Image (cartoon, grey):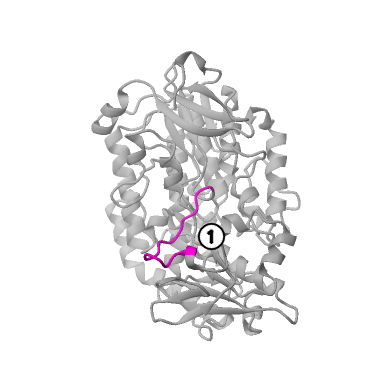
Amino acid sequence: MASAQNHVQYSSKIGIIGAGISGIATAKQLRHYDPLVFEATNSIGGVWKHCSFNSTKLQTPRCDFEFSDYPWPERDDASFPSHVELLDYLHGYAVHFDVLKYIKFNSKVVEIRHLGDRDTARVSDTAGEYGSLLKGHPVWEVAVETNQAIQWYGFELLVMCIGKFGDIPRMPAFPANKGEEIFGGKVLHSMDYSKLDKEAATELLEGKKVAIIGYRKSAIDLAVECAEANQGPNGQPCTMVIRTLHWTLPSYRIWGLPFFLFYSTRSSQFLHPRPNLGFLRTFLCSILSPMRKAISKFIESYLVWKLPLVKFGLKPDHPFEEDYASCQMAILPENFFSEAEKGNILFKRASKWWFWSGGIEFEDKSKLEADVVLLATGYDGKKKLQSILPKPFSSLLADSSGIMPLYRGTIHPLIPNMAFVGYIETVSNLQIAEIRCKWLARLADQKFKLPAVEKMLEQTTKEVEIMKQTTRFFKRHCISTFSINHSDEICEEMGWKSWRKNNWISEAFMPYSSQDYQEAKY
């Protein structure tokens, strides 16, 4: 994309791309720099605004998904908030902290350029220092499209908050002449479905034979919406086509006990491997591994008793712990299995499938008739980043494991003066995003320094190895089994400490909270 250098504006030290949860949290923590936030759409909220269905709800209780300095109204309400309620909460946060003034809406970033020749040096030099985030001069130039006009901006620090979900759907590949072009019905990715209003969604599903590809949260919500649209005399069942089964929860109680006791306290996470353990702790973790397996079996026994998993062939072969460790468990809508019992939701296990004129064909040569095929196949977050980052940085986004090596979940050691927020998952993404944003703000303020590039890469490698030990689904890049330790290390690097960490015995069974670190500076 051609542009004249004299058209570049340098109006702020910091640029932020994206105004979802991570974007507004970053803007709030860096507001003393008057950042510019570029949002491609006309509203904040990210995937909660643009990739949610009518039935989409938060997967965690309100009190476990809130900013430390902005509590939910009626935060003790036990129900899961709808995506509309969550958007209201985010908007209230943005208004309360006057974040909206930093956001340029309908402003899509179409290209990013790095200034100078440091890119080649950084790629090869893993033994050097990362350096300060703010150089006193622009390091990145960003091309922004607004109303079909392109404007370039220069920044010392660029923060990527466009997330892993949304924008670029992950689409299945098919053999020649077996793609959707030979199918006589409609094919939509869940992203496209989310853009339909309730009336249009009902019209698409009502009285139609629908196949839903997938078995994660989006697929489950789609199946329920399809079943609800087909309650009449002309209703048709929908069929979920499932390649990999995952564990699902009816609620956050297991045999009457709150779920947080099993994985979200210091005592429960003490049982799990995590980076930077000494010999004794590593030894203890090893001999306590049978207890971890017992906890996983305990939860599995409840789920098999509570839900008709065996009846419908939906009991996964892998332990529950692996789904928790990869952030893949889902809270079921209340009527999911009741609709399955009525025959409104059917299930088909298949590892490979393709289209035929009347629907879907499977590798065993069986066929499924369909009028509509909905692809709940996820998103390609790396491709989204690679499409705008320049070379050689775009090739560094994934290491040999296919994971983005982010130190403290935020800094890529080989990419200068750039941060990433919202790319490493845990059970409560909002809380961990807020802590990382606070860490990033203090790093920008030079309150502490980063380790050498080599040391940061060692840390990210350790985290990947822990994830590989814990779950076969490690490429999801989820740190849920050592999230408290992750937050502790971030806060200790900032010069903070956790009051719960220092009252370990009395607080060992309390759930983790972002308030743990609020009043505990050294």
Residue under the point 71% across and 62% down: 79
Above or below, comparing residue 179 to residue 30 in the picture: below
**Residue carrying label 1:** 509
Q: Is residue 497 left or right of residue 52?
A: left
Instruction: Give the extent of the magenta segment.
Output: 167-181
The number of numbered discs placed on residues in the rendered structure image is 1
| Above-or-below relation of 477 to 128 | below
Q: Is residue 42 left or right of residue 511?
A: right
Q: Residue at x 54, y 29 (%)?
A: 144
Given the current orientation, which residue lies at the most extreme bottom position?
311
Q: Considering depth in this image, is 398 or 34 the residue closer to the camera?
A: 398
- Residue 158 in the magenta stretch? The answer is no
Q: Residue furthest top?
A: 6
Closest to the observer: 185 or 139?
185
Q: Secondary structure at mark 1?
A: loop
Secondary structure that dominates the magenta span: loop
Q: Amino acid at mark 1?
A: Phe
The image position of residue 406, as x and y in percent, is: 39, 42
Which quarter of the figure is the N terminus placed in? Answer: top left
Quarter of the image for residue 5 reads top left
Q: Is any atom of residue 522 visible in this view?
A: no
Q: Is residue 168 shown in magenta?
A: yes
